[in-house]
Amino acid sequence: MAYIRKNVWQLGGDWADPVLWYARGVKAMKARPLNNPLAWRYYAAIHGIDPPLWTQLQYLSGADPMPSSSEQGIYWAQCQHGSWYFLPWHRGYLIAFEKVVRAAIASLNGPADWALPYWNYFGTNQNALPPAFASPNWPDGNGDNPLYVTQRYGPDDDGNVFVPMGDVNLNQLGDPEFVGLGSGGSHGFGGPATLFRHAAPASSHGGLELQPHDQVHGLVGGGTRQRPGLMSFPDSAGLDPIFWLHHANIDRLWEVWKHVPAVKAHVDPPDPKWLNGPGNSGERAFILPLPGGQQWTYTPGQMSDLAKQEYIYDDLTPPAVVPQLASRLLALGASLPSETKEPPADRERSSPKPRPSNGVWKLTLGGVDQISEVGEMPGLKSVELLGANEGRLALVGAGARVTVQLDEQVRRKLAASLNAAKDTGTPDRVFLNLENVRGENDAVQLS
């Protein structure tokens, strides 16, 4: 059977049955000890765990029974970020979690067809935290609501949790490419090609991971290192029950991307390294515990086709999305080319004007000590560096200014390439990168 994931704001009430049963399932998981593979904290640790942070947040104590080191090495600290594995890993994680919650609900004589709701903060008047998560009480007025956590501080750090619509967008749904370039330039929709990469908050995140994924995490969690919000840090985010509804929406948007009308089809990578996952390259495989003592190993290729999963979404309608090339030209006040698709190969070769091999350039700010892309797949094309500033750039107050030294030879190549675009109708892209940005916590935002 296909389980139907529905919008939490359209279930028929603040405590509609799917939400009430989710709370009961979460309560059952929270009652299990940390070393139980089906426990709430165990599943959060699969995403990531920072013992000092968990201790500070009062989710870990010296009395907690711990899994063996070998078991932790198999299951814990797996989440993929800054990687083309971000979307497929989290899809499998959601599937496994949903099975665990459903089994807990079934043990309480709940509905056998329960499915995880999603939080579509882009829906009209749906950007507030769903009410069942905002109250410490169950619907009958009693306390100890397992969906409520105190470590949600919101965008203004005042406990009012909502997603400001000016801080999130769906522009990345117009990106035609799944795979980005870790060396700079386009992030791609799904992220740069890497080996197994856990967390990596300083790496290049894919378009959907950057926006709205990262933004919503920080806006909901808020806080600082001294007063951490659960959602603001990858190593504590899985402890917050709203995490799972947020990621269900991100998973839904992956499928929405495939339905966006575009000149160039939006498809997942055909590369065997992506399809077979890091386990096929000698790295850690994606392995999760399931009810009944089962162990599930999965690959990105198995996650790619939603039609082959056991669940569907009630709404995959694409929003009105302007293709990224067009949106960037419009933002610059430039007229749109008559053609927005890639030029045919024979037309490209017939142009007498020089062009770079990959058509992507970047300016870099933030110092020449650029982020190291440890674990990135070898043999991938990289961007051409047009220029960079020297030293660090302090981002203080309302703005900052810096001088960028351009490489004259590369500048001439870029000028020739942009001039050639008059013939092809498709200009190369120039990116301004802010690299090595540091803030007080993982959820720091620039606007």
Image: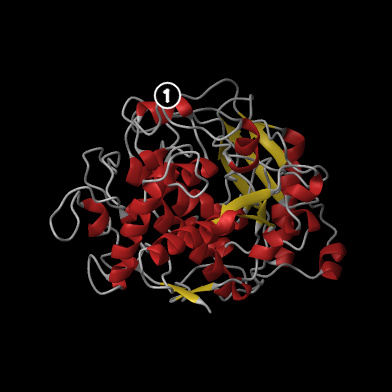
For the residue pair 58 and 332, the one nearer the viewer reads as 58
Which residue: 40% across, 43% down? 239
Position of residue 123 relative to residue 352, above or below, is below
Residue 255: image x %, image y %? 55, 69
State left or right for residue 155 relative to residue 257: left
Residue found farthest to the left: 141
Which residue: 43% across, 31% down? 64
For the residue pair 197 and 66, the one nearer the viewer reads as 66
Position of residue 40 relative to residue 330, above or below, is above
- Secondary structure of the residue carrying tag 1 is loop
Residue 444: image x %, image y %? 41, 36
State left or right for residue 106 relative to residue 84: left
Q: Name the colour scheme.
A: secondary structure
Residue 280: image x %, image y %? 79, 50
Determine which residue is flagged by label 1. 62
State left or right for residue 32 relative to residue 436: left
Q: State the quadrant of the C terminus.
A: top left
Q: What crowding class fits label 1: few (fewer than 14 Cα within 10 Å), some (14-19), or many (20 or more)?
A: few
Residue 19 in sight here: yes
